[in-house]
Image (tube, rainbow, N blue to C red):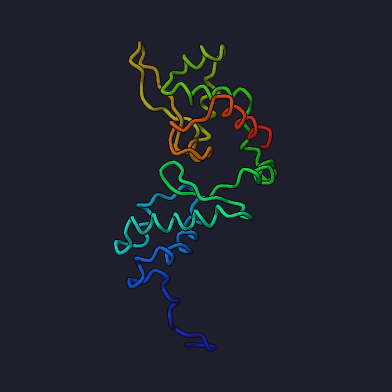
Amino acid sequence: MTDGQSNDAAPDPVAPDNAGDPQALVPVIEALLFASPDPLPIRAMRGVFGEEVTVETLKEALELLQERTSADGRGVVLAEVAGGWQFLTREEYFPWVRRIARTRAEEKITPAAIETLATVAYKQPVTRAEVDAIRGVLSGPIVRSLMDRGLVRVVGRAELPGAPFLYGTTRRFLEHFGLKSVKELPDPKELARLLQAQADGA
């Protein structure tokens, strides 16, 4: 002990004696979610806390945290996204966040890329030739750029002559639009609006 500092460790908010208390987990989970760049699955949280914390307790704690972030006056909400949990900006505050995004040139997306991404999202798995036919123009370079952004990936090969690649959207795509799965895709016009909003704000 030096300069009046104690060797005593900080109290563990999730010690074995209160590992079953969801309230004790809430601040720790909030810190984990804040620090994680990607949606955090429950199994990853369980790995942090250990087996003394049950899945049921984690779910209760997440519900409590979700209730807190759903209150008026909060800038974020807690949502289940792409197989995990993540803080998302409230929709009404997104225009402010978009101002920061304007400084990030790498996030810019062209109208042609918007059209291509929407085509892949709703027609997946889809070949590049099919994307070209739907759009009426060659889409190879755009598909590659969407792959570089992590929004589109190869999901297999078509049973056609030459076995062309089949393309689909990625986990990052789900994260970006706050979707649990592609089954939650919005109306095509709504997705186009969201993509266009990103293009305008980038």
- The x, y position of residue 79, in whole percent, is 49, 47
Question: In front here: 141 or 134?
Answer: 134
Relative placement, left or right, of 98 versus 180 is right
Q: Splitting the image into 4 quarters, where does residue 189 fall?
A: top right
- Look at the picture and state if 15 lies above or below 44: below
In x, y percent, where is residue 137? 57, 13
Quadrant of image for the C terminus: top right
Residue 82 placed where, x, y %? 44, 41
In the displayed structure, would residue 137 be above or below residue 173? above
- What's the residue at 35%, 12% (across, down)? 160
Q: Nearer the viewer, residue 99 or 27?
A: 27
Q: Position of residue 188 (x, y in %)?
A: 55, 24
| Residue furthest out toward the left | 51
Residue at screen point 33% across, 73% down: 17
- In this view of the protein, which residue sits in the foreground, 20 or 16? 20
At a point 63% along the width and 35% down the height, the residue shown is 198
Q: Nearer the viewer, residue 156 or 13?
A: 13
- Kindly indicate the quadrant of the structure image that contains residue 11: bottom left
Which residue is drawn at the image coordinates 52% and 30% (left, top)?
A: 186
Say how many tags the image has: 0
